[in-house]
Amino acid sequence: MKSFWGSFLGTLVGVFVTFLFIFFVVIGIVVASISKFSAQSDNVIKVKQKSVLHITFDGPIPERSSKNPFENFSFGNFEYQPLSLGLNDILSNIEKAKDDPNISGIYLDISSIPAGIATLEEIRNALLDFKESPNGQAKKFVVAYSEGYAQGAYYLATVADTIYLNPEGMVDFKGLSTQMMFFKKLLDKLEVDVQIFRHGKFKSATEPYFLDKMSPASREQVLTYLHSIWNYTLEGIAKQRNISIEELNRYADNMLINNSESSLRYKLVDRLVYKDEMLEVLAQLTGQKSDKINYVDMHKYTHAPQLKKEPYTKNKIAVIYATGEINGGDGDDKTIGSEGISKAIREARLDENVKAIVLRVNSPGGGVVPSDVIWREMKLAKKEKPVVVSMGDVAASGGYYIACDADAIVAHPNTITGSIGVFGVFPNVQGLFANKFGITVDTAKTNQHSDFGNPYRALGKDEGAVVQKWIEDVYQDFIGKVADGRHMTKDEIDSIGQGRVWSGVDGKRIGLVDKFGGIKDAIALAAEKAKLKQYKILELPKQKDAFEEIMKNAFDGEVMMEKKLRAEFGDTYQNYKNLQSVLKYKGVQARLPYDIVIY
């Protein structure tokens, strides 16, 4: 018997070791293959004369490019998708192409762009700047082609000298809308009771859990910022296409743009062409044959040599990226961890060569305590060197909390900001467990409130009163910090707070924003405040190396599950994520009312 078990265990160990060996061989092959691809893409490229910078957008546009070649690799099914270029490299490439004598022009090959409207505005402004050719260079062209323009893509395309459209395509032009998903009836069916505590009549982050449609106050703020963003968008289109705003609204209200012919008739596009005809256009513009056009895609052009020599100076401006929900911990490129961002701010503050700090905020908010931890580091940094905030698509609630004490706040007119308010959510799943699953929970405790926050019972009246006082105290602290940072009174902040969401246009009007602009403008302002003429850029937090990311993607079950759910549910995944974030977080939250997706 002993020999049997010895043989059995030996075989089992052998199988296990063999499995591990095969697994790591496969991982090694994958790593070697992608690393080879990555290394090849990192080689400096030579741009041929009369080249065309080919711009497409195949995926979401992050704030900065990932340095990890495995970012879009799925270890579950061994599929690899090309990395999306970050906004930082997109802007840098367009700026570089402007000065590059070998780049004749830009070809926008776009249909739908999964990016926020402020991100599109930043790219659009860079393209407008590109068209202003440097002295001594021939005028450079920008042309756009699509088989069908979504509204965001069309807004970007309006910078083009000529807009081309497939004869069977159309321009989606109908105005803006946003949807908010409500969970009350679902929670009722599941017998999940949710106790809500909040301050501010506009703090509608909690409405999905006790209403089945928008409250009048919520609808008011949504319509206000939608109209603000739409009007600003129309101004840009009207200027480039020489069509009045009144006419553009008439097109949208009456659905006049419904095919390619109407798109051409109402002058939203200039010509209807097929792809082969578009290539002939590019050939004429560059003086080449249509099958010999020198294209340079954005990923490759990132590795083209810089034409402007890096300044010989030790002076730096730290650009710190704060992207995603605000929680504790280190965070990553998609989430803001209070420890990670605080460490980055502290590193920039203590570095004698860093003369100014730019905090790039693209966040709907999150936990109050993590937000306050970051706010504290911002305040300390401000005492020693200029601190400027650059707002992306969203910098609201906790996102505004961490920004409010900066020397200056720079945002786009269509940035979503404000939402100065707080709330708390306490779910009670006792009914779900008892009536749906037949599970009951019993508790033993030493003190009357030892099980405070237990999700298997409702809060008592006295406990609810304590929570509401927390909410009120946190709100007063929040508006006090905003008032100090913005040099306003608490009453003034309260009148524009109450959880209300504002566009960048209105945010500047009411004093939440100092000036309009993008990340480049914020950096220039920081340099001006620090009296710098020459400087280098230091990007923080430092991105994790490829090996760390491989291990995380390969063995982190939560990461793998998120990728599967995102692939399965598509756009609706974010609604699930929002529900999970609000219900899972323990404590007071400063979070945007909902995930704003503008169609």
Image (spheres, helix red, strand yellow):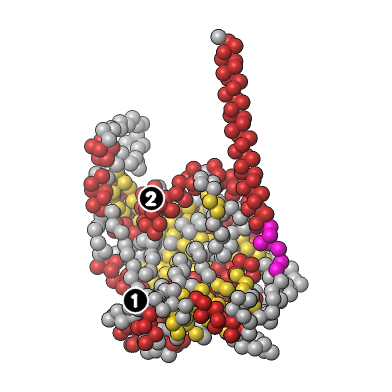
The residue mark sitting in front, 2 or 1, is 1
> Residue at image x 57%, y 73%?
54
Return the x and y of residue 170 as percentages of the image width and height: 38, 77
- For the residue marked with disc 1, what is the amino acid? Gly
* Quarter of the figure with residue 364: bottom left
The reply, left or right, for residue 269 in relation to residue 319 is left
| Number of marks in the rendered image | 2
Give the residue number, with chain letter if any, for mark 1: 175
- For the residue marked with disc 2, what is the amino acid? Gln
> Residue at image x 56%, y 60%?
83
Return the x and y of residue 354 as percentages of the image width and height: 67, 66
Instruction: Give the structural element (helix, strand or loop) at label 1.
Output: loop
User: Looking at the magenta stretch, what is its main secondary structure?
Assistant: helix
Instruction: Give the structural element (helix, strand or loop) at label 2.
Output: helix
Start-end of magenta stretch: 38-45
* Quarter of the figure with residue 423: bottom left
Could you say which is closer to the camera, residue 438 or residue 144? 144
In the orientation shown, which residue stands out farthest toward the top?
Answer: 1
- Relative to 21, does residue 406 appear above or below in the rendering? below
In the orientation shown, which residue stands out farthest toward the right?
Answer: 312
Looking at the rendering, in which quadrant would you find the N terminus?
top right
Q: Earlier in the sequence, mark 2 or mark 1?
A: 1
Return the x and y of residue 359 as percentages of the image width and height: 56, 66
Q: Which mark is residue 580?
A: 2
